[in-house]
Amino acid sequence: MELIFATNNAHKLEEVQAMVGNKFTLKSLNDIGCTDDIPETGDTFEENAKQKTDYLIKHFQVNCFADDSGLEIEALNGEPGVYSARYSGSRDMEQNIDLVLEKLKDNTNRKAQFKTVISLFLNDHQHFFEGTVEGTIINERIGTKGFGYDPIFIPTGFDKTFAEMTPEEKNTISHRSIAVSKLVEFLCPEGSS
Ligand code: ITT
């Protein structure tokens, strides 16, 4: 089955394609010729994910899904949250990570979670699927794999950052994999052919 994934983030696309395997062939915004910077102005991941699928319905009239995600840090009252991609005012992840580490300097509460909300628009119906993974923010970057805030996040129960994990390891436990599993189960329930 072919599915349109309303994203411009190549890392997300790669992760989700690996998770869905050969059940679905994913097409990104780029693949369908959409180069627009889709507005994300909501206060929640759910609103932003829906804005992305609403945009594609309005302009391309296609069934599609979108992922809005980010890092919520307890000591920062849930920031960067929906502002994860541009926390420092730019999309430069070096600057965004620097800002997080600076704000958490000398703070002993390092609790955080990654959250993903998927919006699926299918045959005139709206659906949402959510995934979270809890962990801690460390004091410096470790690891070079993954993307975004992966080098400063250690998921609970592990002793290494997401950026030290292979894609397979991260994809087994991540917020995104939890949300994507729910999406896949909805689209192809276990046992159905
Ligand atoms: P699209 O909207 O085109 O999908 P985006 O990068 O703008 O791509 P978001 O609006 O959902 O995506 O922003 C999420 C940001 O949160 C992303 O840019 C990363 O900085 C961070 N993020 C999301 N998932 C992550 C993950 O699995 N690991 C590390 N950082 C992540």
Image: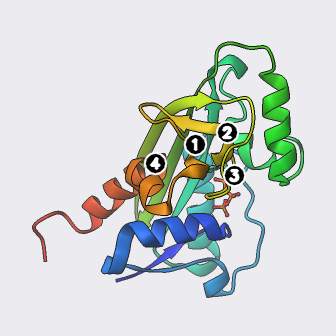
Cα–Cα span, label 4 and label 1: 12 Å
State which quadrant residue 181 falls in: bottom left
Q: Could you say where residue 151 lies in the image, as x and y percent from the top left? A: 67, 45
Q: CA distance from mark 4 to mark 3?
A: 13 Å
| Mark 2 crowd level (few <14, some 14–19, many ≥20, 10 Å Cα) | many
The kind of residue tagged 1 is Thr
Q: Confirm or reject: label 4 Cβ below 8 Å from ligand 1.
A: yes
Q: Is residue 33 above or below residue 185?
A: below
Type of amino acid under label 2: Ile
Q: Nearer the viewer, mark 1 or mark 3?
A: 1
Q: Which callout, 4 or 1, points to the residue nearer the camera?
A: 1
x 72%, y 53%: residue: 40
Location of mark 2 (residue) = 152
Q: Which is more toward the observer, 178 or 119?
A: 178
* Residue behind label 3 places its C-beta within 8 angstroms of ligand 1: yes
Which class describes the residues within 10 Å of circle 3: few (<14), some (14-19), or many (20+)?
A: some
Mark positioned earlier in the residue sequence (1 or 2): 2
The first of marks 4 and 1 along the sequence is: 1
Residue occupying the far left of the picture: 191
Residue occupied by mark 1: 161
> Disc 3 or disc 2, which is closer to the eye?
2
Indicate which disc, 4 or 3, sits on the residue closer to the N terminus: 3
